[in-house]
Image (cartoon, rainbow, N blue to C red):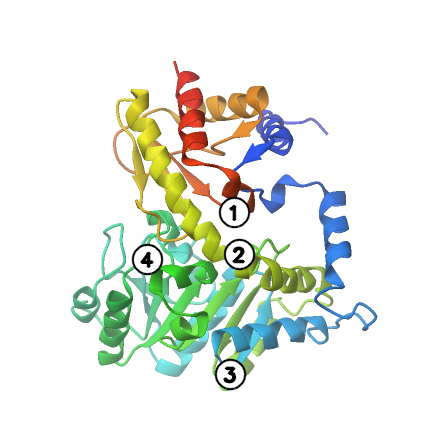
Amino acid sequence: MAVTDEQQQRNRRLAAWRRSGKVLARMSADHTLAERLTALASGAGAVHDLDEWTDVYGDGVVAEVERRTADLLGMDAAAFFPTGTMAQQVALRCWAGRTGDPAVALHPLSHPEVHERGALTSVSGLRTVHPTAAPRHATADEIRDLPEPFGTLMLELPLRDAGFVLPSWEELEAAVAAARERDAVVHLDGARLWECTSHFGRGLSGIAALADSVYVSFYKSLDGLSGAALAGPESLIEEARTWRHRYGGQVFQQYPAALSALLGLERELPRLPSYVAHAKVVAGALAEGFAESGVPWSRVHPEPPHTHQFKVWLPYAAEVLDEASVRQAEETGVTLFRRWFAAPAGPPGLSSTEVTVAAPGLDWTAGDVREAVADFVGRLE
């Protein structure tokens, strides 16, 4: 089969990132099949008894992930799902049936609106309403004053497409209270909830306690292979298991994903606060580096970051920035940025990238970041 230009470019990027000796984060997709399988086999025994029989339709190690997740979030129960899209679809569908209102209030930049091809409406028959279109979380007044009823308020924490932004704890409490005043239930899109504890100054169970249900992902921040969980009251989770089956999510065996989820909870979850703290150092140094470099304009947002991820904007075409990024990785062994994308709004020629700081990024000093920025900008000329 012929290799397309896009496949060639992807292979080039993956090879450059993999060979780089200095990166801010290693992503799971950067590894070969052999590397991922070897790492899983070597580490899984530390988190689960591998002499146990494999799972069948959700028992065994899958049930252990569910128990562990429910405990961490302080919820009655949890159900494992193959994807977060399915978990969230099911949660919002169940709540619509219970409230009698198919309207879901959420942000237009939230995952269901941007990344799920209209599935809430097409698959689940739900309707969405938007308290705000500003690139931030809705305020309590905006939720309270929304001029039409809704049965569920969905809050994405953090709001990725706005720059991985979070409200303050007081703002979050007020938003939830405003929804309660309108007799709505509250669901958290917590795909990246794991790294929110530092910003809020609360543990996971304390954050989750504000909501009626919470969805979490095991691969976005915890380096799992795949998989998600929906947590909430026992009756909701039992109903969710029924809908999971109807949606095709009753998978025969899921032990690789479940074992990688347990590894992530054991190894990555305790490290996330250190990643969040160092992301602030990296973001500040990036801003300084761009200010010193002579680029006509730049933006690091939010500054400081609310989690270990944030966004950077530059006034260049995405293909120009992509080429500079991959050449820097190929020629210096330093991967500062990964993919760039044209901004969905604003003037032409404006592009953004997402920056993630994980374990490898802890070795970067502010000086390292500024030096890498200078080298990167030099490749744009």
Q: Judging from the image, what secondary structure is the residue with disc 3 in?
A: loop
Whole-Å distance between the Cαs marked 3 and 1?
A: 31 Å
Q: Mark 4 points at which residue?
A: 166
The amino acid type of the residue labelled 1 equals Ala
The answer to which of marks 4 and 1 sits earlier in the sequence is 4
Q: In this view, does 155 lie to the left or right of 217?
A: left
User: Which of labels 4 and 1 is toward the front?
Assistant: 1
Which mark is first along the chain, 3 or 4? Answer: 3
Residue shown at 71%/71% (left/top)?
Answer: 61
- The image quadrant where one finds the N terminus is top right
In whole angstroms, how far apart are the C-alphas of marks 4 and 1?
Answer: 19 Å
Q: Mark 1 points at which residue?
A: 358
The numbered disc on residue 3 is none
The residue that mark 2 highlights is 271
What is the distance, in whole Å, between disc 1 and disc 2 at their CAs?
A: 9 Å
Label 1: how many Cα within 10 Å (few below 14, some 14–19, many 20+):
many
Q: Position of residue 66 (x, y in %)?
A: 60, 74
Residue at 26% x, 34% y is 346
Secondary structure beneath label 1: loop
Q: Which amino acid does label 4 sit on?
A: Leu
Query: Percent position (x, y) of residue 246?
Result: 59, 72
Q: Tell me whether the residue at label 1 lies in contact with that at label 2, contact meaning CB atoms closer than 8 angstroms.
A: yes
Q: Earlier in the sequence, mark 3 or mark 1?
A: 3
Amino acid type, residue under disc 3 in the picture: Asp
Find residue 76 and name its label. Answer: 3
The disc, 2 or 4, on the residue closer to the chain's N-terminal end is 4
Residue 256 position (above or below residue 25): below
Mark 4: which secondary structure? loop
